[in-house]
Image: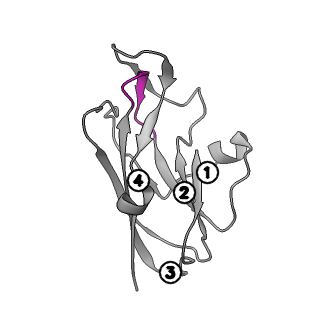
């Protein structure tokens, strides 16, 4: 997981468009189809059980595994803020038993790893009242 504090707090009832890009690392043996972006009022604790119990507002949908290593896959969705969200966390919000994986030949050492492109350039949040 990776978490950052937003420069502005999200407003209650406002519809936002969230987007980010991911790419499977060349050295990963496995690909997944579970990655998402969660907005919270407080910095999430490092307790994985808490994170696994959350439903990200923006997530990869469908049955397509994220296998691309040469380019980036855009993950995006529109959501309505409950208000006061100040933190953004990106990761797989499923535990090991719920995470679908696909073995991909050519991996070198990592079981499962995904790159997230530079946060400044690729996470887009646009609010509409």
Instruction: Give the image location of residue 119, x and y in percent.
Output: 44, 57
Could you say where residue 55 lies in the image, as x and y percent from the top left? 55, 52
Looking at the rendered image, the disc whose residue lies closer to the viewer, 4 or 1, is: 4
Give the mark nearest the N terminus, 3 or 1: 3
Magenta-drawn segment: 25-34
Local packing at callout 1 (Cα closer than 10 Å; few below 14, some 14-19, many 20+) is few
- The secondary element bearing badge 4 is classed as loop
Estimate how packed mark 2 is, as few (under 14), some (14 to 19) or many (20 or more) residues with alpha carbons within 10 Å.
Answer: many
- Where is mark 3, residue-wise? 13
**If you read the primary sequence from the N terminus, does the residue marked by circle 2 or circle 4 appear first?**
2
Q: Residue 38, labelled with which disc?
A: 2
Q: Are marks 1 and 2 in contact (CB under 8 Å)?
A: yes
- Please check the rendered image and state whether residue 88 is part of the magenta-colored stretch, yes or no: no
Instruction: Choose mark 1 or mark 2, whichever is in front.
Output: 2
Quick check: 73 above or below 124? above
Above or below for 57 versus 74: below
Q: CA distance from mark 1 to mark 2?
A: 8 Å
Residue 24: x, y in percent? 37, 33
Q: Considering the image in quadrants, where does the N terminus appear?
A: top right
Q: Residue furthest left?
A: 70
Query: Disc 2 vs disc 4: Cβ atoms closer than 8 Å?
Result: no
Q: Label 1 belongs to which residue?
A: 54
User: Residue at 42% of width from left, 62% of height from top?
Assistant: 120
Q: Gap in Å between the C-alphas at discs 2 and 4?
A: 17 Å
Q: Which residue is mark 4?
A: 118
Q: How far separated are the C-alphas under marks 3 and 1?
A: 20 Å
Q: Nearer the viewer, residue 32 or 112?
A: 112
């Amino acid at each position: 997981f990776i978490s950052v504090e937003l420069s502005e707090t999200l407003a209650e009832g406002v519809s936002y468009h969230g987007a980010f890009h991911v790419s499977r690392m060349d050295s990963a043996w496995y690909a997944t189809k579970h990655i998402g972006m969660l907005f919270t009022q407080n910095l999430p604790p490092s307790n994985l059980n808490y994170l696994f119990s959350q439903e990200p507002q923006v997530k990869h949908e469908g049955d397509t595994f994220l296998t691309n290593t040469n380019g980036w896959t855009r993950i995006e969705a529109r959501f309505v803020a409950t208000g006061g969200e100040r933190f953004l966390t990106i990761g797989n919000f499923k535990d090991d038993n719920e995470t679908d994986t696909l073995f991909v030949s050519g991996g070198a050492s990592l079981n499962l790893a995904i790159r997230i492109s530079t946060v400044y350039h690729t996470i887009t949040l646009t609010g509409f009242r």
